[in-house]
Amino acid sequence: MGGVSEDVPLLDDLMPWAVGSLRLGRDWVAAPDPAALRARWAALTGAEAAERERLFRPSRSRTPAAGAAALPGQRSATARFADAPGPCPEPVRVLRDPFDQQWLLPDQRLIDMARPELWRVLDEHQLFTVETPDLLVTAHLPAGRLGRIRPLHRRPGGAEPNLAPGLLPLLGERYGGWAAPEDMLCWILAAGRPGPRGYEVPLTADPERWRAGLELGHRLLGVQLRGVRGGEPPRLPGGRRPYVRSALVAWPHELAYDPASETLSLGGGTVSPVPAGAWEYEAQGVRVLEAWLAARGEHRDPAADGLEALGPAEWPQAWTSELLALVTTLALLADLAPERAAFEPGPGLSAGELRAAGVLPPPHWARRPASVLDHQEEGPGGQFALL
């Protein structure tokens, strides 16, 4: 992309509030199957004290002898886990790895670093960007081995965008119309690129290029969200859809791909058509489909021990549906990749111009969480936290 220089704005300045990844501390608190998490909870809480200690996998941050505050918006006990674990919290959907949606037990007593500030702004209006180093966008809480997380909104209800103050009014003035927070996110998806200084986001001075970037960015966003925000689930062009051609009759141990017939084999089961772009799609240097299957077989690994070894005995039907949706998502992103790579923002708004307009640098408060509490939160041992 032309025009990238020291004067190109950085994502870190345009979306100032960033939070580090959640650090779970123990793998058994997350799984691709919510029933497995309930089984693990039952096994843990039903064990004798010494065995419970072993199964828990204590760390410096979390042990069964400690309590912790309830995560904002979640129902969980707050007493010492060893004394009163309470009922199993309802598993919540999370993004565990790039494009891999799994489930998590939302109990802060089990998680080394749960990032409560993210849970406070998690609702149906929120979107999270994650640097992996390419940018991912998800409506689910990112809770895995991922990069820095930037919520689109600083407060619940879609209030107060996590954007440099003054940026949206300036862009609206330049482009002849109001710029919404999601518009800026779509522009970042279309025009942003990893660079030596960080994730660079060239801004255009041309209203036509802005509109072209928004159109491309909205398509990219729609594919990544997979219809979870009320939109239509993405579909392959021409009415093509991946189907199960032969059902899985046994647990698949590996994937294989035949490019001639566009067929993906999972053990004895087959799915087609699977475009080559979906099979070859990589994130963090790993094929996404292979990593997705490996995550679903981890509990069957002979080396799996303790609660991590508890998982479904048979392949859940829901996983097949998830696989078909994932194939579609990856195929569409692969199709959009050349268009995105060729996108040029044109003559730019430099970081110098943004500084002259008072947009950059963002104020220090914009890099910190907003005070969002309009209710009490239960702290350790049932005490109410006053924030």
Image (spheres, grey):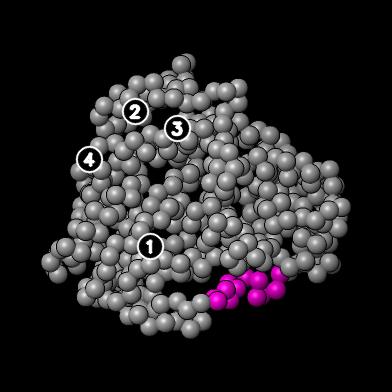
Q: Nearer the viewer, mark 1 or mark 2?
A: 1
Badge 1 vs badge 4, beta-carbon distance below 8 Å: no
- Name the residue beneath numbered marker 4: 313
Query: Looking at numbered disc 4 in the image, what kind of residue is underneath it?
Result: Ala
Q: Are marks 4 and 3 in contact (CB under 8 Å)?
A: no
Disc 1 to disc 2, how far (Cα)?
A: 32 Å
Q: Is residue 168 above or below residue 133?
A: below
Q: Sequence-wise, which precedes: disc 4 or disc 3?
A: 4
Q: Secondary structure at mark 3?
A: helix
Give the residue number, with chain letter if any, for mark 2.
Answer: 266
Q: Position of residue 253 (x, y in %)?
A: 29, 33
Q: Secondary structure at mark 4?
A: loop
Which label belongs to residue 106?
Answer: 1
How many C-alpha atoms fall within 10 Å of the one at disc 3: few (<14), some, or many (≥20)?
some
Q: Residues within 10 Å of mark 4 (few under 14, many from 20)?
A: few
Point out residue 156 in the picture as x, y percentages from the top left corner: 58, 66
Rendered view: 164 above or below 278: below
Q: Residues within 10 Å of mark 2 (few under 14, many from 20)?
A: many
Mark 1 or mark 2: whose residue is earlier in sequence:
1
Name the kind of residue labelled 2 in the image: Leu
Residue 26 image point, x, y percent? 31, 60
Picture disc at residue 184 = none
Q: Earlier in the sequence, mark 4 or mark 2?
A: 2
Left or right: 168 with respect to 289?
right
In this view, the residue in front, 314 or 302, is 314
Inspect the image, locate mark 3, and give the three-letter code of the amino acid beneath it. Answer: Leu
Q: Is residue 69 above or below residue 304?
A: below
Segment tinted magenta in the rendering: 362-374
Give the Cα separation between the discs numbered 4 and 2: 16 Å
Q: Which residue is mark 3?
A: 324
Seen as rendered, the residue at the extreme top is: 260
**Mark 2 vs 3, N-terminal side:** 2
